[in-house]
Amino acid sequence: MKISIAMATYNGAKHLQEQLDSFLKQIRPPDEVVVCDDGSSDNTIDILEKFRDAAPFDVEIHQNENNTGFVQSFGTAISLCRGDLIFLSDQDDYWLDSKLAVVEKAAFDDEQAVLFINDATIAFADLASTGSTLLGRYRAEGIPDSSLKIGCCVAVRGWFAKKLLPFPKQFVFHDEWLVGFADGLGRKKIVENSLQLWRRHGSCSSKFSAWDRTPEKIRKLCSYAQAINVHRRREQRERALMSKCFFMEKAKELKAEEELEYIHDDIVIFIRNLERKINVLVKRLDLREKNIFMRVVLGATLLKKRAYNESGGVKAYLGDVLGL
């Protein structure tokens, strides 16, 4: 199995060298590293070129002519990878030396899975451990393991990643696209080992970083404030609807490809589930345009049909009725 690492960089000189060093320490070294830089103005390119000259494996550096954003940069890096298994790498984490070996074994052991996502230890800016991992945090807050979709923890089979390119420009995060498809097909594998340090600092692109050191009481207050932000709630549902429509469009394309016949049934199930979820979201958005009496009646009908089962149950129903 050939292993590629796809990395997107942008003004990452402060932490980049530590991540590159962790590639060199892998007990199962990569066969290639492909980097797409999005127009860095610091010495990121110098660091990458020195790494390329010294690395015992192939290193390819692609520089975007125009700034495209990290999502499209990841798409470019993936498109240039030749590996059977492609690991996605941020520019500021640190991988434990067993990461590639452990995930590669998982890929050999589970031939049905198309995407693998490992646990990570949450670290401060200096890489000192916070004492918790992503899965540990999820479980402590009652979030199911299946919700794990952090892109820097993802490895994806090369053929599958290429089928999902290009990334829709409307998506904020590439991992939402890749992991969403693997989840929809029932072919995501969670590797419970913590295989990297996930560095959290002020310039992180992940929204999760806002929670890292926030006291629990303040977090609850923030949740309450968000609950009464009607406009934001509507935007979230509209975005969810849009993303599912993009999933639907791509899933139908994949369904028509003869070479994917062996996962045809999985794609059909995914499409059916998307149709159901889209239908529910459309009705919920339409519900908010009704008067409160109609919201109560129509919302109760959706509740009875279990349309709220995947979105919060009675709590979500009450939110729709009250226009929250």
Image (spheres, rainbow, N blue to C red):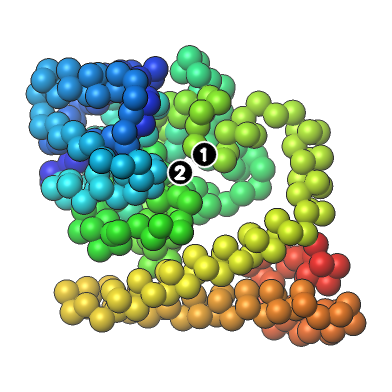
Residue 25 showing in the rendered view: no
Identify the residue at horizontal 57%, vertical 64% (top origin).
240
Relative to 116, is 139 on the left or the right? right
The picture places residue 264, in percent across and down from the top left corner, at 29, 78
Identify the residue at horizontal 36%, vertical 31% (top origin).
10
Identity, as a three-letter code, of the amino acid under mark 1: Ser
Find residue 209 and report its image quarter.
top right
Read off the residue under disc 2. 150
Identify the element where label 1 is drawn: loop
Identify the element where label 2 is drawn: loop
| Relative vertical location of residue 98 with respect to residue 174 in this rendering, above or below | above
Residue 2 showing in the rendered view: yes
Q: Nearer the viewer, residue 92 or 138?
A: 92
CA distance separating discs 1 and 2: 8 Å
Badge 2 crowding class, 10 Å Cα cut-off, few under 14, some 14 to 19, many 20 or more, is many
* Residues tagged 1 and 2 counted as in contact (Cβ below 8 A): yes
The picture places residue 322, in percent across and down from the top left corner, at 86, 67
| Relative vertical location of residue 26 with respect to residue 81 in this rendering, above or below | above
Q: Which residue of the protein is positioned furthest toward the front in this rendering?
A: 66
Identity, as a three-letter code, of the amino acid under mark 2: Ile
Badge 1 crowding class, 10 Å Cα cut-off, few under 14, some 14 to 19, many 20 or more, is few
Among numbered discs 1 and 2, the one appearing first in the sequence: 2
Read off the residue under disc 1. 206
| Relative vertical location of residue 86 with respect to residue 22 in this rendering, above or below | below
Q: Which residue of the protein is positioned furthest toward the right in this rendering?
A: 293
Identify the residue at horizontal 61%, vertical 49% (top origin).
143
Relative to 78, is 18 on the left or the right? right
Find residue 262 and report its image quarter.
bottom left
Identify the residue at horizontal 30%, vertical 76% (top origin).
253
The picture places residue 67, in percent across and down from the top left corner, at 35, 41
